[in-house]
Image: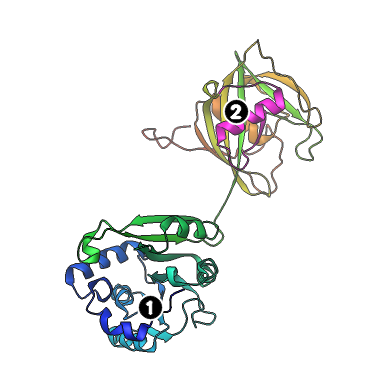
Amino acid sequence: MTTIDWDAAADSFDEDPDHGLLDPVVRAAWARRMESWLPVTDSAVLDLGCGTGSLALLAAERGHRVTAVDASPAMADRARAKLAGTGAEVLVGDANRPPVGERRFDVVLARHVVWLLPDPGAALRHWCGLLKPGGRLVLVEGVWSGAGIPAERLTRLLAPLAERVHHERLSQDQALWGGRVDDERYAVLAHTRPPHRHTEVVDVHLVMRRGPDVLLARRAGTGYADGLLHAPSGHVEAGEDVREAMIRETAEETGVALDPEELRVALVMQHRGPGGAPRVGWFFEAEYDPARPPRNTEPDKCSELTWAPLDALPDDMVAYCRAGLDAYRAGERFLIHWHEDDDPVAYAPDGPRRAVPLRQSGEPADAS
């Protein structure tokens, strides 16, 4: 890596609009970008390799709590002067391992720093560790006359560290640079995973119609709701969409190979079982084809397949499935089915009804 004398460079940075941001047009352009890159609310921002503090000042002026770090004492002194009165803190230290102790930040900001680091991947991992859950990296980089770091490489380094990575081309925005530039300049925003984001299992259910009847399967040997009837169903697996999952589950449980065009969305339901976690169920309708009769292809999980009238369903069903089929028959399309912890898994003819239809646009609020 080339060694750069930052103390000597400090004397020239404020005369360069690319770094000093003294030109009002350039400064306004960077202020607009910073507004879009930083959180809307007051946040803790760590500016690494801050130089004379130009970007740190833009962040502080927007009400953010700024900690700025630079390896050069001369640069740090100039940043302190520029940031005087903003409440920002300026430290002398290495961007690879900034001297911030156990503090955590909402944003780690670095401009034209990553390309100089001996091990960018290690530094990025450390910087992500300085972020609060849900925090973000804001990195401005480029490639100049063969030096620098390409956006593709930086994005690849960040991919395993972030929930999502966003790349913005900056070369074409002449206001940022005080004129036209022909090299590659860009910003990358990497958002880390937020704390305890709620997730739900997604499952799929087949409503196979044979005239007035629907296909049901009796559960057996699964350890859950055994002996009760349920529509052919299963969970969506990683990488699948819900339609792909329905086609796979139908083939695995009944031996019927459906084409995507044969499936129609019948109902979407959010469900919580007794004492369990919420999940989302997609019910798909398909027509029975006599040329492809369903058969029990999972006898270790199902004791029988049977047909039942949709308007006279049997009582020995899983309550979740029964609620979905009842709502489907009534023409509902969206449903919440929320068990109390002491409710039975089985449908109870005389028990409380837990299904709450969700109204579609244009329907009266009291429709049932």
- Kind of residue indicated by mark 2: Leu
Q: Is residue 191 above or below residue 229?
A: below
Q: Position of residue 248 (x, y in %)?
A: 64, 30
Report the magenta residues as a range.
Answer: 231-259
Residue 289 as seen in the image, left or right of residue 173: right
Q: Position of residue 99 (x, y in %)?
A: 49, 83
What residue is pinned by disc 2? 325
Q: Secondary structure at mark 1?
A: strand
Q: Position of residue 177 (x, y in %)?
A: 24, 65
Q: Residues within 10 Å of mark 1 (few under 14, many from 20)?
A: many
User: Could you tell which of marks 2 and 1 lies nearer the N-terminus?
Assistant: 1
Q: Residue furthest left?
A: 24
Q: CA distance from mark 2 to mark 1?
A: 56 Å
Q: Residue at x 24, y 74 (%)?
A: 21
Q: Is residue 102 above or below residue 189?
A: below
Hey, which quadrant is residue 321 in on the image?
top right
Q: In the rendering, which numbered label is found on residue 66?
A: 1
- Kind of residue indicated by mark 1: Val
Q: Residues within 10 Å of mark 2 (few under 14, many from 20)?
A: many
Residue 180 counted in the magenta span: no
Residue 188 as seen in the image, left or right of residue 15: right
Q: Position of residue 74 (x, y in %)?
A: 35, 88
Q: Residue furthest top?
A: 290
Residue 242 counted in the magenta span: yes
